[in-house]
Each structure stands twice: as structure tokens, then as C-alpha cells.
Amino acid sequence: MDLALANLNTLASTMSQVDPSRAAVLGTVLAWIAGLVVLGIRSPKPQEHHLHQSKMPEGYTARTEGEQQIINAYDEAQALPWIPFLMRNIRWTMSTYIVMIHVLAAFALPHLLDCKTQTLFGIAVFYFISGFGITGGAHRLWSHKSYKASASWRYFVMICNSVANQGTIYHWSRDHRTHHKYSETRADPHNAERGFFFAHVGWLLLKKDPRVKLAGQHINMDDLKMMPEVVLQKRFDPVWNLFWCFAFPALTGHFLWGESLLKAFMLMGPLRYVLILNGTWLVNSAAHLYGEHTYDEHANPSENPAVAIISLGEGYHSYHHSFPNDYAASELGVSAQYNPTKLLIDLGAVFGLVTDRKRSLKLWEMRQKNRGITKTVLQGPPMLKIRKVVERRSIAAAGECK
Ligand SMILES: [Zn+2]
Ligand SMILES: [Zn+2]
């Protein structure tokens, strides 16, 4: 007993001597290696445990013999060795970038304890700004065109989007339109049927499935080619986004409130960036796997309030996939469903910067009738309500099949 206690004490004192930043870095690297291994052993075939697998038709099929050969070669390479460094379709540059940025974020963590208070606010502000650049910009404005906005709003949101540094608006929107059109098929860039890790980040670490590439080539992007703010960002990619994501927050903290340049960079750059990256990725992973399928019981996208908190209101994903043109991306108002993105767009409308906000509530009403839904209830804590279907007639009794 004494010996066990002595061993425990030795272990505890050894642990306390480990530099926390080193432990965090080691933990991050190990987690990523584990992730790659998980990715490696994943078969590209749909996983049995997902709820509605295979209900959707295959999103994209080859049109020529050559296309089919490319697809076959990809599938073969995916099915081969599960040891990551033997895999043939890892994007090594992107993988290294993503691992390194997580390592930098881990190194930044200890500085949370010795930075200025303004810097802590700065992390939150840049998290919100960059998050809105994705949710209110790349997503609801440019991908879905769910509202219209003045030039000043569009340029401002384009800068916010650049702080998020998730590729250009043009490429983000093309991938996102592909995601909606071919949701949870092999042509979906982050097909959640390939598991949580793939939908979260694995899709960025691997070369694109040729079906995704081919599907993307057939997505109409002419509208965004005509938008000067989108073209400007694309023209100066990647320097433009790198400046706004890393240099701008560092300079702001350094010159506005005298934070050391290194701390301002590490905390409002890599750390904040990694937080909002993972917040965005959770919409593709968690909100496609966990939650109520209220608005379309045949599709995996889910109502996930935890993701809504992290992603500024993008967690109501069953509603969003059912009604992608709705600028709120949620059924209810902000007092019932936390949705700061909607709030900010509404604020823009008050000042006349935003117009033509589309809603889909009538469509939802029609769908309830068509699908025989007779009773729903709202569940959950205040501001995080989720609608749940509790009663429906059988489809035959409802007299319709859709
Ligand atoms: Zn989705
Ligand atoms: Zn969307």
C-alpha cells in the first residue's frame, strides 16, 4: 500500500514537472496521428451505424469510361493500406498545415494565463467576426443567396470571411453547393456517411473523391464570378486571407492595447483560428450525425443546439438542409433558437444594408401536411429549443407520398 502511494506520489511529481505547453503539443500530435489511423481503417463504404444510410441515391455517376476509371482507381487506393504514411491519397501539404496550426494553437494555450484582459476579449471578438464571415457570408449570403446586401455590407463580410481563412468564398461556396446537392453521397465533399472524423476534417486531409470533383465542375458558379468582392478575394488568394487571419489580429492587439506581438499573434491568430475552424467543422460532423431529424426524417442532418452555440446559430441543420434558402437557417426566432447570425443580419436590415431576407415557414407548413405530421412539440432550455415531431398519420392515411 505504502509502495503504491509512493509510486503515485512519484508519478504526480513527474507529471507536475512536465511543461504544460509540451504536454498540449504532444497530446495534439498524438490525437492527429490517431485520427489519421482512424481515417486509414475507414472503408469508403457507408457505415452501418448511421441512421439513414443509402436512402439517398448515389449523387454522381461517371458519364464516360475515363471518368469511371478515375473513380475505380480512387476507390482502390482508398481501400488499400490503413497505415497513414502508406496511403496514396493524403494531401500532405494540407495535412501538415492543419496539424501545424493545431500545434501552434496548443502552444498558445499557456498564454491565456499571462496575456492582457483585452486580448481575451480580442479572441472572442475575432472568433465572432470570423465566424460571421462564414455563417452570414460564405454560407447564407454567397452559397445560398438567402438574402441580398449592399456593397458596403458585402465588402465588410468578405473581410470577416478572410479572417476565417477557410479558403476563398468562391471555393467554399462551390463545395457547399455540392454538399447540398449531393448530400451524403460519394459526391458530397464531407460525406458524413464516411464517419465523424472524415466529415469533420478528414475530407481536407485526403485528395477529393473524383465524384466530388466532377460534381463540383457541374455546379453553376456564374453568379459569384460577377461579384467584385468575391473576385478580389480570389485574385489575391492565399496572401489576402493569411494577412487578415494572422497578421491583422496580431497587429490589432499589439498597436491598440500594447499586447506583445507574439502573444497577440498566437492567441488571436492560431488559437482563435483553430477554435472557429473546429466550430465550423462540427456543423459537417456532429450536426450530420447527432440530433433530431425533425424536418426530414429521411435525411441525416440534425437539430443540434450544442453545435448552434459553437457555430453562431448553424446547428439547426435538419431545418437548413430541408429549407436551404431560409436566411435564418432555423425555424424559430432568436429568442427561441440561439442564432446570432440571424440577429446580425436582421440588424443589417434595420440600417437598410440588408434586403430580401427569405424565409421558408410556409413551405414547412405544407410539408407537415404532406407528410401527415399532426403534432409537434418544442423541447429544450430557453433559447435552445428544438422542435420534435410527436404524432403523424401514416403516409397512406395522409393520402400523399411526399
Ligand atoms: Zn450539411
Ligand atoms: Zn448550407
Image (cartoon, rainbow, N blue to C red):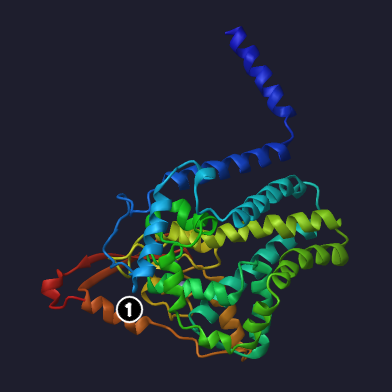
Q: Is residue 209 left or right of residue 68?
A: right
- Depth check: give the residue in front, 105 or 235: 235
230 lies above or below 62: below
Spot occupied by residue 400 in the image (x, y as percentages of width and height): 16, 78
Along the line of sight, the residue nearer the viewer: 74 or 65? 65
User: Looking at the picture, does residue 113 appear above or below residue 216?
Assistant: above
Residue to which mark 1 is pinned: 364
Q: Residue 277 appears at what percent x and percent y?
A: 59, 60
Q: Is mark 1 within 8 Å of ligand 2?
A: no
Q: Position of residue 54 (x, y in %)?
A: 27, 60
Taking the image as shown, residue 228 lies to the left or right of residue 82, namely right
User: Quick one: SS at disc 1?
Assistant: helix
Displayed quadrant of residue 369: bottom left
Name the residue located 43 percent from the left edge and 67 percent from the top edge. 212
Quadrant in which the C terminus appears: bottom left
Q: Is residue 290 visible?
A: no
Residue 114 place in picture, x, y as percent:
80, 47
- Work out whether residue 148 or residue 1 is closer to the camera in this orientation and state it: 148
Q: Residues within 10 Å of mark 1 (few under 14, many from 20)?
A: some
Q: Residue at x 33, y 51 (%)?
A: 47
